[in-house]
Amino acid sequence: MALTTRLRRRVAVWGMDLVNATSRVLRRGSGTVAGGHLALRIDPNLLRSLTEGADVALVSGTNGKTTTTALLTQALRTAREVATNDTGSNMTTGHVATAAHAAPNAVVVLEVDEAYLAKTAVWTTPRVVVLLNLSRDQLDRASEVRMVAEKWRTMCSTTTATVVANADDPLIVYAASAASSVVWVAAGSSWNLDAVGCPSCGGHIAFGDDGWACGHCAFRRPMPSVACRADDGDLEVALDGVLYRHPFSLPGAFNRGNAALALAAASILGAAPEQAIAALVEVKSVAGRYSHEVVDGRQVSLLLAKNPAGWSSLFEVVAGNGDPLVLSINARTADGADPSWLYDVPFEVLRGRTVVATGDRRHDLSVRLHYAEVDHAVDDDQRAAITRAATPGRPVTFIGNYTAFGALVAEVRG
Amino acid sequence: MIRIAVLYPDLLGTYGDGGNAQVLECRARWRGLEVAVAQVLAGDEVPDADLYLLGGGEDGPQARAADLLQRDRGLHRAVDRGATVFAVCAGYQILGHHFISSDGSATPGLGLLDVETVRTDERRAVGEVLAEVVARGWTAVPTLTGFENHGGRTRLGAGVEPLAHVEYGVGNGEDATEGAVAGNVVATYLHGPVLARNPGLADALLERVVGSPLAPLNDERIALLRDDRLALRP
């Protein structure tokens, strides 16, 4: 019996590697999905057996998954070997590819799609689960956020993991408070429209400077034990009563929150906070996000935002500078096919800026900007849009949603 | 003064529905008309207004919105005195006799439209829609474009007319109709938001409220979007 199980696992991994290598050679995607499908058909229990006995950390949420996974990985590498799915394949097919090639004592750090988190937690018995935030995203193909919060709550009520959770997002608190061990992190939130109705009693949640609370029941922001603060671009994190401070290059309050969550998780998994934070601040860009490229002779800062919460938090980042903006919107499968959500994004803050709309759905964006009363130009080509937006002496900021961003990164990096 | 009331944006505003109010507000203001938009949160009293908007939402919030509106009765009184109501998706279903709650059971609606939303074995209707307006008094509105995303199918009773005839997509679901109209109550499944994609429908609603034709606006940007979407035409 044991022999058959081991044999099945070996055949599954061998088949997966063969297919993945072939698809990488043929450049048909990141090279983990097709092989993973095959392997899971040969051995449906593959993820469970591959992670048995390993320390596993899972990272999920609507926004910041990839970045927080990268920050946690960097922080943990100061203390331990790490295997992680940094290709963007955040479903089971990607997870088995990562776990199959983890070194014997490595921590397996997995970015997990929101809809896959509950079953991934069952298969991998994680030591740590990091819960970032939940908000509306891709409503044409994803579950309603409250259904996700309910599933996460059920997962939390049975997991043996320590849950590292954002205390500033009521839907996250609703899910995580069912866990027996929680570390609350004040990671911030710039979007609360999906949490106005109390997930616990249906009452009205009021948000203030000192947190949030339901007006009808006892559901309120828990007292965080980890907090972060923005100060002149530095990252300042209070963890276990000690204040750590380092210069930090990733922009925005949301990335300081991601860093605080990553640091709390790394410390649970055995990293010394001082070394971990020093390593984590070395992350300058994540899969192209936050990178600075030269496109046709112009300096361009690349930012990715996929949904209203993501765009809102990026607008906080770009509000301070007057740099010209190229905004790119697609509505392919990975983006969600309905760009109605553009009307949940406060484009009004861009009045007076140089703005060029591009992407497959540039005309949807153009009409949104029209009603936001933002003057803008439209270009059907992303690179031409960058040239059109460019002003001498100023970098262009490019913000694209998922496939729009991916297309530009692929084009400029070749 | 045109008074627009957005009903329960915290429950029925999941699909960028706030955009419909913004489009109406801009198109009135750009013509020099005075306009005020009130955001009526769940639990607040439904105020007097000339035009009420209801948007899309998830199953739980939809049932709660129906319950609150049933108790408030303010929307019923508004319809009785001839106010204009424009409802989208979950908001459309709420106006009917029944709709389906998250557990699959039939939940009482407001009975302001003679329609009934039922569950069928068919797949959730998700995708682009093109539809020709057929309701009497509304046929000057050009082809509607929008995006639908709904599980239920809506049957029209004798007391309503279909808003439009579906050319592409599903709409109400059983008879190639889309939306419903009775008097000044207009409802549709289309997101987009639908008034951003269809300025003709936005202006027709404003003209109902104002009672006279409106001056044209520069809609070049919107024309390009419409060309893009109408290219789906089979």
Image (cartoon, coloured by chain):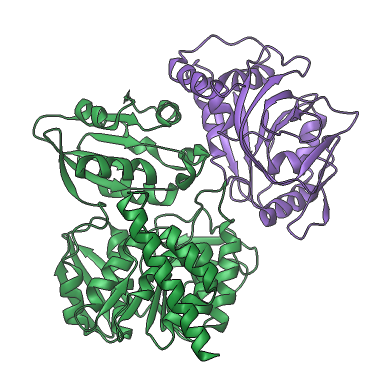
Chain colours: A green, B purple
Choose top left, top right, bottom left or bottom right for residue A199.
Answer: bottom right
B78 to the left or right of B39: right
- The answer to which of A63 and B76 lies nearer the viewer is A63
Choose top left, top right, bottom left or bottom right for residue A265.
Answer: bottom left
State which quarter of the image contains the C terminus of chain B.
top right
Q: Position of residue B222 (x, y in %)?
A: 48, 20
Q: Position of residue A375 (x, y in %)?
A: 33, 24
Q: Is residue B20 visible?
A: yes
Q: How many marks?
A: 0
- The answer to whether residue A152 is above or below residue A307 is below
Q: Position of residue A129 (x, y in %)?
A: 43, 76
Q: Position of residue A172 (x, y in %)?
A: 49, 68
- The answer to which of B220 and A93 lies nearer the viewer is A93
Name the residue located 38 percent from the left edge and 75 percent from the top edge: A99
Q: Is residue B24 visible?
A: no
State which quarter of the image contains the N terminus of chain B.
top right
Q: Residue furthest left?
A: A393
Choose top left, top right, bottom left or bottom right for residue A208.
Answer: bottom left
Name the residue located 27 percent from the left edge and 64 percent from the top edge: A256
Name the residue located 80 percent from the left edge and 28 percent from the top edge: B81
- The answer to whether residue B64 is above or below residue A338 is below
Name the residue located 81 percent from the left edge and 30 percent from the top edge: B175
- The answer to which of A262 and B1 lies nearer the viewer is A262
A306 to the left or right of A353: right
Q: Residue furthest right?
A: B158
